[in-house]
Image: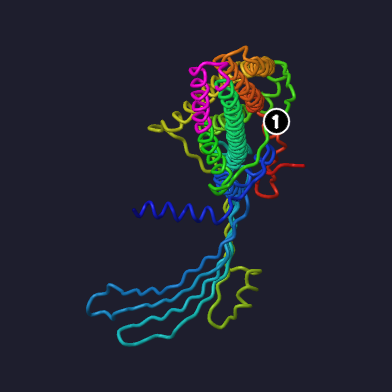
């Protein structure tokens, strides 16, 4: 009971508020899809995260500045024997200063730190507390570590950034693939709705003709020119067409709801659409189409990027087989002052430092036993390169067969459209002729119904052939990777790769 009341309330609300009407054609449907389709929204969010990952990778080769500070107190108790005085030393110290680190593109690392340390100390012997002493120490340290074999060189040093750039380009391709999938999905839903709507319209016209034929048959029956069985046949034909109309209207509403869901429109929306009156024929040559596909296909471009990543991984793995030989250099300079000095004196003292230390040398690490991880990494990298070569060649062959198949399907769809159009014209002429004969009493209801069914079937066939040809063109665009170019969709990098239709 409650369910019926709720349904009645919803029906009343629907009657009170008129359903929104949206006028659509294919271009408008694509434009709405770019801004409202869920898959594109999710793809843009993923792209936002991938774009920031590239920033993080590039940041690794830029100087990083930190500020470090340590503050605390240390207490030291002596372990003297009982007869000796007990010694206790307290020291409070605060150390602070900036630190700069820079990972250079050649694989090395440069660092600079400036430290200022302020210390306060006091010693206590038994119950006697000594004087408090204050010290101020300032200094800086510069160091450089540069690999000469393993981990050194421009290729290895920038490998992390290069891999991130490849990943970012793959992310862009994935977003383009998402947009292409959304465009094709909306186009398919739009054409399905157009076909269902036109099918319902054809069913209504067929029902109208059937009712007209029924009226004529009743007049002929009253005049005794046809038998009662033929009149019953006319009524049965009208009932069958009413059933066909109900089925067509249900299919139309189902396809409308699907299209509304894809375009993020309310379920009550009504679409005003018109089937294309004529279609421009498209021709394609296999050689030209293959060249376009190799240049524009997203999966083929992604495969090339995967090849670059695999080769870069192999170069890094080969470099990792070398010995670890590094050049190290460090320069330290500091100045220490007592309590009578000021901060300015301490900093000025760095020009006449109390302590200077310079180190330049080499460090070498040679694996002798138990180091199989690097050999495994090299083997895996070699296998990855060879596997990619096989997959890339297989993809090339798949693209060739897909392009040939799509072109053949397009040609077949064009011929089918021509035949379907001719069949509809002939079927319409046959219905007109047979209806005239029936009104003249020279034909039967059965013949008229048979030709009428054939005419409806030919109308449906022409509509299906027309939309089938459009789908064949869309399929060829997808196979060649030119869907976005066909619909003039661009991904605006200034607007965070948001897709839009260019004028």
Q: Is residue 323 left or right of residue 173?
A: left
Q: Magenta span has 227?
A: yes
Q: Residue furthest top?
A: 442
Q: Is residue 110 left or right of residue 228?
A: right
- Res. 462 image quadrant: top right
Q: Which residues are magenta?
A: 222-247
Above or below residue 438? Residue 165 is below
Q: Residue furthest bottom?
A: 128
Q: Main secondary structure of the magenta part?
A: helix
Q: Considering the image in quadrants, where does the C terminus appear? A: top right
Above or below residue 86? Residue 393 is above
Q: Position of residue 44 (x, y in %)?
A: 59, 46
* 10 Å crowding of disc 1: few (<14), some (14-19), many (20+): few
Q: Residue furthest right?
A: 503
Q: Position of residue 167 (x, y in %)?
A: 58, 39
The kind of secondary structure element at disc 1 is loop
Q: Residue at x 58, y 41 (%)?
A: 164
Q: Is residue 84 left or right of residue 112?
A: left
Say which residue label 1 marks: 276
């Amino acid at each position: 009971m409650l369910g019926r009341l709720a349904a009645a309330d919803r029906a009343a609300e629907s009657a009170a508020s008129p359903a929104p009407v949206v006028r659509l054609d294919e271009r408008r449907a694509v434009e709405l899809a770019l801004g409202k389709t869920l898959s594109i929204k999710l793809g843009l969010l993923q792209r936002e995260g991938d774009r920031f990952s590239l920033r993080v990778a590039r940041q690794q080769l830029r100087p990083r500045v930190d500020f470090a500070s340590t503050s605390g107190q240390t207490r030291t108790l002596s372990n003297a024997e009982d007869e000796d005085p007990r010694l206790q030393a307290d020291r409070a110290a605060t150390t602070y200063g900036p630190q700069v680190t820079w990972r250079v593109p050649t694989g090395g690392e440069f660092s600079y730190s400036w430290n200022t340390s302020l210390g306060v100390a006091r010693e206590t012997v038994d119950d006697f507390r000594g004087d408090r002493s204050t010290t101020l120490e300032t200094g800086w340290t510069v160091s450089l570590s540069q690999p000469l074999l393993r981990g050194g060189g421009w290729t290895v040093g920038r490998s992390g950034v290069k891999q991130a750039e490849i990943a970012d380009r793959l992310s862009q391709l994935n977003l383009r693939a998402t947009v292409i999938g959304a465009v094709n999905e909306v186009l398919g839903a739009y054409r399905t709705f157009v076909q269902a709507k036109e099918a319902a319209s054809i069913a209504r016209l067929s029902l109208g003709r059937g009712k007209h034929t029924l009226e004529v048959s009743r007049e002929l029956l009253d005049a005794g020119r046809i038998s009662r069985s033929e009149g019953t046949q006319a009524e049965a034909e009208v009932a069958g067409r009413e059933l066909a109309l109900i089925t067509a209207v249900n299919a139309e509403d189902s396809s409308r709801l699907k299209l509304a869901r894809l375009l993020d429109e309310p379920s009550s929306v009504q679409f005003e659409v018109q089937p294309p009156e004529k279609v421009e024929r498209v021709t394609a040559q296999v050689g030209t189409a293959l060249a376009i596909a190799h240049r524009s296909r997203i999966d083929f471009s992604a495969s090339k990027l995967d090849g670059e990543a695999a080769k870069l991984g192999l170069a890094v793995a080969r470099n990792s087989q070398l010995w670890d030989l590094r050049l190290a250099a460090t320069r330290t300079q500091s100045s220490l002052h007592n309590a009578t000095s000021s901060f300015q004196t301490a900093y000025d003292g760095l020009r006449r430092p109390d302590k200077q230390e310079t180190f330049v040398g080499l460090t070498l690490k040679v694996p002798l036993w138990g180091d199989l991880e690097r050999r495994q990494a090299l083997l895996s990298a070699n296998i990855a390169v060879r596997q990619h070569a096989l997959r890339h060649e297989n993809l090339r062959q798949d693209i060739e067969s897909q392009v040939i198949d799509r072109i053949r399907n397009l040609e077949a769809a064009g011929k089918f459209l021509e035949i379907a159009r001719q069949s509809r014209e002939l079927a319409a002429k046959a219905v007109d002729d047979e209806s005239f004969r029936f009104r003249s009493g020279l034909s039967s209801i059965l013949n008229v119904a048979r030709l009428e069914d054939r005419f409806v079937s030919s109308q449906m066939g022409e509509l299906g052939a027309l939309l089938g040809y459009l789908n064949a063109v869309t399929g060829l665009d997808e196979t060649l990777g030119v869907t976005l170019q066909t619909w003039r969709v661009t991904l605006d990098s200034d607007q965070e790769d948001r897709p839009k239709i260019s004028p």
